[in-house]
Image (cartoon, rainbow, N blue to C red):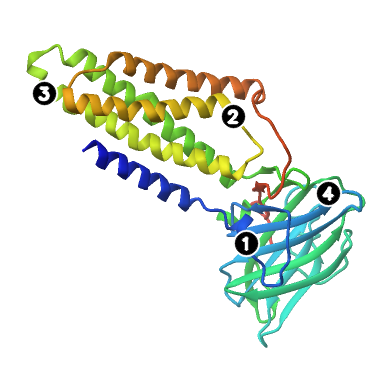
Amino acid sequence: MLRSVLLFSVMFSLYISSSYSQPCEKYNFASNHIFSSCSSLPYLNSFLHWNYDQAAKTVEIAYQHKGPSSSRWVAWAVNPSGQGMIGAQAIVAFKKSDGTMRAYTAPVTSYQTQLQQGALSVPVSDLTASYTRNELIIFATLKLDNLSSTVNQVWQEGPLSGDAPAMHLNSGSNVRSFGTLNLLSGTTAGALDSKTRKKNIHGVLNAVSWGIMMPMGAVFARYLRVFPSADPAWFYLHTTCQTSAYITGVAGWATGLQLGSQSPEVQYTSHRTIAIVLFVLEPSRGEMEESVRRNSNRRGSCCCNLGGFTWYVVVKRKKTSSPQKTQNGINGTNGHTGYAARTRNRA
């Protein structure tokens, strides 16, 4: 039985890990463009790829929007004056009714904008767009003379009316897609990004596993087995909690592996070491309990103590701004932010 549970746990972890694959970093452009950095944007099924030349103050970008029909427009912009829609220096693209692509610049000066073509305060060159494999991609090079390496970015999509952009939705993802982007590090701020969501999932799964279910299993084994009337119920409760905790912990472990693969420049040595020890100790406890039906108090206490110490390490790291965090360079950093109008925004 233990081997079946262990095999299921490993297969489940592989499934969880594969479900969090990152098309952003692995995407191959048909035009053979190569970008050193990318950001999987949290809304509107969009991705931003870029090469930033700090000395020349230029950034070459590819804004990738997956799944739009041929009757929709997409846009990406920087906003030198603030976050949100007003002041955005937008690059707009869509497929015209005759099948050709149109890509142009459009400054956004009011909520009633119709994204008319116009010159931007940020010089743009090499502007093109393509529509292939059910995705629309905008290519452009921006000159950021008066901007720092951290820019306000915004992006949007909406329907077409003939061959002209119509108003986008004023709810849901369309009002959350805005934020800031650091072109050097790839870090972003604004709406909750997908990497943050994965960190939250990782934390919740491990909190439920090692913080709730595992101690409950230990309590059942330690305090219920002394009552004759509770035998063998205490054992089944104990093994159910321990097995469920281990499977949930494997899922949390898998999300941790995926987060680590996305940020190879970040190392949390103590956190990782404790997780490996817990992962190894717990199945060995299960084998002992299944064959002998005895509570391995020492190993159980060790697992609980290690789980508690893991939380101490995490909380301490948060309070001290990650003292164990070492950065060895950034390439292809996967950050996430948003564009779009606030509640009143129009496009």
Report the residue at 41% width, 40% height from top. Answer: 251
Q: Residue 115, how many percent across, how many down?
A: 76, 68
Instruction: Give the spatial CA distance, label 3 vs label 2.
Output: 41 Å
Q: Residues within 10 Å of mark 2 (few under 14, many from 20)?
A: some
Residue linked to disc 2:
268
Residue at which label 1 appears: 27
In this view, the mark in front (4 or 2): 2
Is disc 4 surrounded by few (<14), some (14 to 19) or many (20+) residues within 10 Å? few
- Look at the image and tell me whether residue 184 can be seen: yes
The answer to whether residue 221 is left or right of residue 326 is: left
Instruction: Give whichever of 101, 84 is nearer the camera.
Output: 101
Residue 17 % position (x, y): 46, 48
Query: Which residue shows up at 46% across the image and 28% down it?
Result: 275
Disc 4 versus disc 1: nearer the observer: 1
Disc on the earlier residue, 3 or 2: 3
Answer few, some or many: residues within 10 Å of disc 1's Cα (few below 14, many 20 plus, some between 14 and 19). Answer: few
* Residue at the spot of label 4: 81
Residue 347 can be seen in this image: no
Q: Nearer the viewer, mark 3 or mark 4?
A: 3
Q: What residue type is disc 3 on?
A: Pro
Amino acid marked by disc 2:
Tyr
The residue identified by callout 3 is: 232
Image location (x, y in percent) of residue 61: 76, 60
